[in-house]
Amino acid sequence: MALPPLAVAVAAQPVYPSRPITMIVPFSAGGGTDSIARDMARNMADRLGQPVVIDNRGGAGGAIGADMVAKAKPDGYTVLFATSSFATNAAITVDLPYDAVKSFTPVAMIGRGPLLVVASPQLGVKRMADVIAVAKTRPGGLNFCSAGNGSINHLAGEMLRQKAGLQMTHVPFKGSSPATVELLSGRVDLFFSTVPTILPFVRDGKLPVLAVTSAQRSPLFPGVPTMAEAGIASFDVSTWWGVLAPAKTPAAIVEALNRAINDAAAAEPVKGRLVSEGADPVQLTPAAFGQELGKELALWRAVARHLGMPLR
């Protein structure tokens, strides 16, 4: 008996996934983001029954890797392991080859955590109030370092400059490691650092933590105030990790990926890794992740539009 045309068409569709998935990490191999992505890939492969292959495509603040995903076939076999730099880079770069909203389908967010505001030991400050006082009295003000133009460290420092009305100079580096070296040496004053980057130096007592940038205090540093508690109102900044697919990826595939990613992030070693680095594991639907991404883009675009913020 012949099958109806619809049944034939459905039967011809391969079960997803039927071959390896490529997860593009838009940063070089060996860094913290790459390490989390590799743990995620192994956990996802266990749940999807297919290998998840990491492809590192660093450069242009993550834009090179993001552009590859934006232009990939929307079939669920090429995805982007995105971080908060996806939003911050989009906010200040005027000529990206993709649209941060229209070119992607949000799939899942796996976690988010605060930045730590740390100061050079040579600056001699213990509180944000001390930072503001020094910035207002020192000729030329203060400087702050970052992992590069468009990074979340960069825009968080810019937000402080704008909100507190301080004279501050941005000093970009090619990554967090050289920025940390310069901070320890005293050649730069402040760093809005991700927790994994700076945690060893804080625990060894080499750098003072002045504040956390999230709305709530960090369980890792319960005695450290938030920026709002330190007198900088409405300062709520966090770094995050998530997965994006090309625009027009079928909803059924997005849902399958969302389930696998949420399960992978809730399992070890990913869950423990996030918690140990001061982040909160997160499980969001694709729609909820899209809403959060929209808020992030709006936040950083508002900072970028502020008078005196150079765009590139």
Image: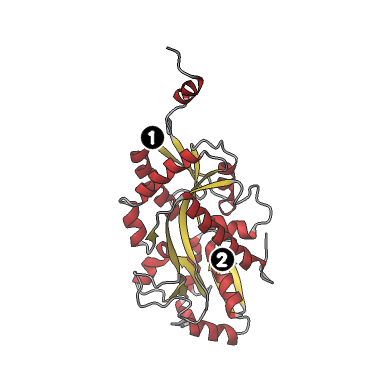
Residue at screen point 39% across, 45% down: 259
- Taking the image as shown, residue 248 lies to the left or right of residue 278, namely right
Vertical arrangement, residue 193 with respect to residue 165, above or below: above
Quarter that holds the N terminus: top left
Q: Position of residue 121 (x, y in %)?
A: 45, 78
Position of 139 relative to 211 (above/below): below
Label 2 sits on a secondary structure element that is: helix
Q: Does the residue at mark 1 contact the one at mark 2 (Cβ under 8 Å)?
A: no
Q: Residues within 10 Å of mark 2 (few under 14, many from 20)?
A: many
Amino acid at circle 1: Gln
Q: Residue at x 31, y 56 (%)?
A: 272
Residue 251 point in image, percent of width and height: 50, 41
Q: Is residue 235 visible?
A: yes
Marks 1 and 2 sit apart, C-alpha to C-alpha, by 38 Å
The residue sitting at 58% across, 65% down in the picture is 299
Where is residue 297? Give x, y as percent: 58, 59
List the residue tagged with mark 1.
50
Q: Is residue 181 visible?
A: no
- Quick one: 39 or 139, which is closer to the camera? 39
Helix, strand or loop status at disc 1: loop
Residue underneath mark 2: 154
